[in-house]
Image (cartoon, grey):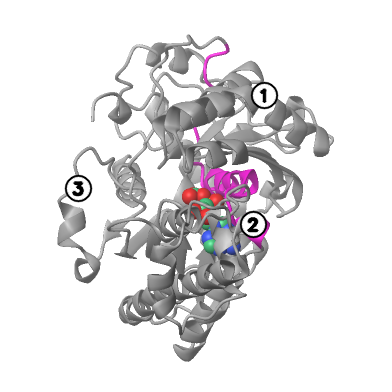
Amino acid sequence: MASNLTPLTSRLTLLRKPSIRFSTKAVQNLQFIPKLSRPLTPFLHRTTDFVSVHYSSCRKARAINASSQDEELVVLGIETSCDDTAAAVVRSNGEILSQVVSSQADLLVRYGGVAPKMAEEAHSLVIDQVVQEALDKAKLTEEDLSAVAVTIGPGLSLCLRVGVRKARKLAGAYALPIIGVHHMEAHALVARLFQSDLQFPFMAFLISGGHNLLVLARDLGHYIQLGTTIDDAIGEAYDKTAKWLGLDMRKSGGPAVEELAREGSHETAQRLQFLLCSDAAIHVAEASEEDRKARADIAASFQRVAVLHLEEKCERAIEWAMEIEPSVKHLVVSGGVASNQYVRSRLNKIIEKKGLQLVCPPPSLCTDNGAMIAWAGIEHFRMGRYDPPPPACEPEDAVLDLRPRWPLGEELAQGRSEARSMKTARIHPSLTSLIQASMQQQQQQP
Ligand code: KG4
Ligand code: ZN
């Protein structure tokens, strides 16, 4: 767990005293004023105890939220956990001022998937430009920002590092508070950006390239995992199917399978036999009419079976969630695969049958984007969960708080999988357990 478990100045730090060498600098740097038209300053006070500042700001921020001063927050969100380099500027009233995504389509085509080292290089090449473009499109400069939010996990650590470095550099240079965001929580919370009256508790089914995650969101930062990924996530299964079928991977595999599946039927199982005899290495654009039809049938059959699996799990999870929180009314479906129309309509049937309402953000907010990171940052910032600005000149080799394997919540016993439990080594404590521990510690303080 070594370096990943030694947070530098994480918003979730549980240690009473900072434990590593840069912490002294972090303490020296404590006197900062989040940039708001009506500043938070009255609630922050200088102290030599970093953690207590963190907690005291946590308590006071609730008061700020209540008086709705947070409308004036403007947050930059940065996302580099996988293969998209994304940045966006979002206001706390829900207005998305800009959104920029640079995808690594060429690399996906070349390597047939995400190659971490290549992805890291690609992020490094474009990160400055993506962030600058997000600011330019929002017609703002760094000086206008209230805070910077950045994905710190889960994801590929090489890739996370690029975004976190950029965020810390920018936050350090402009004395901005920084918020470390859980990527999957951001996929869920973005539903509250899209639908502002969506209240806790709600359920979320997060389906992406790395996860199939069913959670009960009881409150901000408080999640119960009802079910999670054991093997390949659904998005990865779509991508592999696309590759196998010789489809155009430039928009990632999922959309290509969805598109081709519309031409096919899932009731022709014998097609599989046919395809296995044919040469799937030939690109679909060059395939004969018969071959294309066969591939379309396979695409439709794959989609049918894969989504059936999601439907079954979703139905069971709703039953469990309703036992815990009978007041749940909404089920959020988000993550890249949630932009698939077939997936949406099939899940909607289950959700309606169970008496819930589907909330599904538009595709641009379902696939990885900076707006969801900025929004999750805003939600936590309002609760006072943020770090002070990093040092203005942080050394290049600073130990960063990256959490490549970071569960969102604690697993419900019924949903726990033996297969998954075997793979729990090197996992970071869950977001929920960290926040709950910090709240308990806060309550115990005089
Ligand atoms: O959430 P996301 O953008 O990144 C991760 O956090 O993984 O999800 C990316 C995944 C990819 O596997 C991609 O193929 C899949 O979402 N995806 C789709 C569709 N659009 C994106 N899968 C099925 N149908 C789609 N229309
Ligand atoms: Zn994602």
Write down the quadrant of residue 215 in the picture: bottom left
Instruction: Kindly identify which numbered label has been placed on residue 423.
Output: 3
Q: Which residue is mark 2?
A: 285
Q: Is residue 318 magenta?
A: no
Q: Looking at the picture, which amino acid does disc 3 mark?
A: Lys
Which quadrant of the figure has residue 25?
top left
Which quarter of the image is occupied by the C terminus? Answer: top left
The first of marks 2 and 3 along the sequence is 2
Q: Secondary structure at mark 3?
A: loop
210 in relation to 195, above or below: above
Crowding around mark 3 (Cα neighbors within 10 Å: few <14, some 14 to 19, many 20+) is few
Q: Gap in Å between the C-alphas at discs 1 and 2?
A: 36 Å
Q: Gap between marks 2 and 3, in whole Å?
A: 40 Å
- Residue type for callout 1: Asp
The mark nearer the N terminus, 3 or 1, is 1
Q: Are marks 2 and 3 in contact (CB under 8 Å)?
A: no
Position of 244 compared to 253: left or right?
A: left
Q: Residue at coordinates 48% horizontally, 31% vertically from top-left?
A: 159
Residue furthest right as drawn: 139
Where does residue 116 sit, x and y in percent of width and height? 43, 32
Residue 190 occupies which quadrant of the picture?
A: bottom right
Name the kind of residue labelled 2 in the image.
Ala
Which x, y percent locates residue 53?
A: 45, 30
Range shown magenta? 363-392
User: CA–CA distance between discs 3 and 1?
Assistant: 36 Å
**At which x and y percent is residue 345?**
57, 79
In this figure, which residue is indicated by the disc labeled 1?
Answer: 128
The answer to whether 149 is drawn above or below residue 94 in the figure is above
